[in-house]
Amino acid sequence: MAVLHQYDYLFATGMLFAFLDAWNIGANDVANSFATHCIIGGVIGVGIASLGADEVVWGWNGVSQVFAAWVIAPAIVGAFGAIVFTICKCAVLKRKNPLRAGLIIIPVFFAVTTGVLTMVVVWKGAPSLKLDNWGTGRILGCIFGVAGGSAVLCTLFFAPFLHRKLVMDDWQLKWYHAFYGPLLSRRGEVPPMPQHEQKQVVQDYYSGHKTRAQLEESRTMGRDIVDDIESSKEAR
């Protein structure tokens, strides 16, 4: 394909708008796959229009990696989502005391999340920090150090706050009481809520909805009604 230099301005204009779109995504923290598809497609399009299709690196070292990521990334995310849900289901939801189990596993999730985010940053994720000379031991120490520190902070401060709010229904608790940490255990028993302060400490999202037992009872009653109707028709 011939290169039409009179259309070089298309390439420059396309790059400018691609940069503005990428900046808008980062500035508003609303990145999504559709936006990246548009950016990649626009860059490839102006590249073909101004330089020719042969100048686009179609191989694995070029745009093919991006195309493959669009397929591989959702599969990986789905697999990790299934793993996390299975862990929550088996370790929390199916326990005799799901609330207690949830409070125990929260520091673990905090540790895993902060550890993964730290790995993304220190392992070729932040060139401006100039961490390329870090060895494997230093990187692993940073990752596990941040993860462990996050788990300790969550155990000392966040878990007692949640226990006080969810288990003890402390209606006087404010958001800044989370900084009290272990000292929350010294607050003593929760006083009765005054009549003019009657409110839900924790939002009940199941309010107005039937439980599983109630749904099964309704279905059984519905089948019985249908059977009675059918029997009356046959009797006629």
Image (cartoon, rainbow, N blue to C red):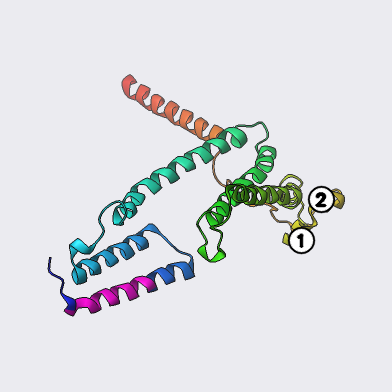
Query: What number is the disc on residue 196?
Result: 1
Segment colored magenta: 6-19
Between 113 and 178, the one lying in front of the other is 113
- Residue at screen point 56% across, 57% down: 133
Percent across and percent down for residue 76 are 42, 44
Q: In terms of image quadrants, where is residue 175?
A: bottom right
Classify the position of the N terminus by image quarter.
Answer: bottom left
Graded by Cα atoms within 10 Å as few (under 14), some (14 to 19) or many (20 or more), the crowding at tag 2 reads some
What's the CA distance linking mark 2 and mark 1? 30 Å
Residue type marked 2:
Pro
Residue at 32% in and 24% down: 233
Q: Position of residue 115 (x, y in %)?
A: 60, 49
- In this rendering, the count of numbered labels is 2
Which residue position is annotated with label 2? 182
Judge left or right: residue 92 versus residue 191: left
First of labels 2, 1 by sequence position? 2
| Residue 18 picture quarter | bottom left
Question: Residue 192: x and y, percent?
Answer: 82, 52
Can residue 135 be seen here? Answer: yes
Report the side of 6 relative to 18 (left or right).
left
Q: Disc 1 marks which amino acid?
A: His
Does the image show residue 191? no
Taking depth in this image into account, of 55 and 41 the one nearest to the observer is: 55
